[in-house]
Image (cartoon, grey):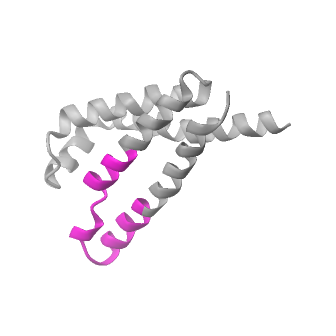
Amino acid sequence: MYSVIQQLGFLLLGGVFVWAGLEHFLRFRTITAQLGEQGFPAPIPLLAAGSLLEVAAGLCVVLGFYRPYAAAALVGFTIAASALALNFWRYSGQQRQGLRSAFIINFAVIGGLILAMTMAQ
């Protein structure tokens, strides 16, 4: 029973990244335009590379293929993406509040990824 629950956790954790990466590809032009307006450096190649990493590493977390390394890559990605795209400190009001909430939620995601890095297959 424990391993079924564990696999569900990996599915949910990795699945979030797969979903987000695929969504980024589906809305690529819109998202790169938004990132460019926010002053994001090199939005086209970075969004492509980040989205590819999200899908590939997310699948690895779900399937257990090099899970510790995939989770570690997603930790680095999540830290970088949070610092670059969720820079709430540059905004005020509702926009600041929304970005800050997403930034804080990413800390919980990083915690889950750290657990995934340490759990046996």
Outermost right residue: 1
Q: Residue at x 21, y 41 (%)?
A: 32
| Image spot of residue 20 (x, y percent) | 44, 40
Residue 18 horizontal side relative to residue 32, left or right: right
Residue 113: in magenta span: no
> Which is the main secondary structure of the residues drawn in magenta?
helix
Residue 28 point in image, percent of width and height: 28, 36
Asked where in the image residue 86 lies, by quadrant, the reply is bottom left
Q: Quadrant of residue 88?
A: bottom left
Residue at x 51% of width, y 51% of height? 109
Question: Of all residues shown, which one is farthest toward the top?
Answer: 65
Query: Farthest bottom residue?
Result: 93
> What stretch of residues is rendered in magenta?
78-103
Residue 95 x, y percent position in the rendering: 31, 69
> Where the N terminus falls, by quadrant?
top right
Taking 102 as reference, is 113 left or right? right
Horizontal and vertical percent position of residue 94: 34, 74
* Residue 102 vertical placement versus 111 (above, below): below
Is residue 100 on the magenta stretch? yes
State left or right for residue 75 relative to residue 39: right
- 25 w.r.t. 31: above or below: above
The quarter of the picture where the C terminus appears is top right
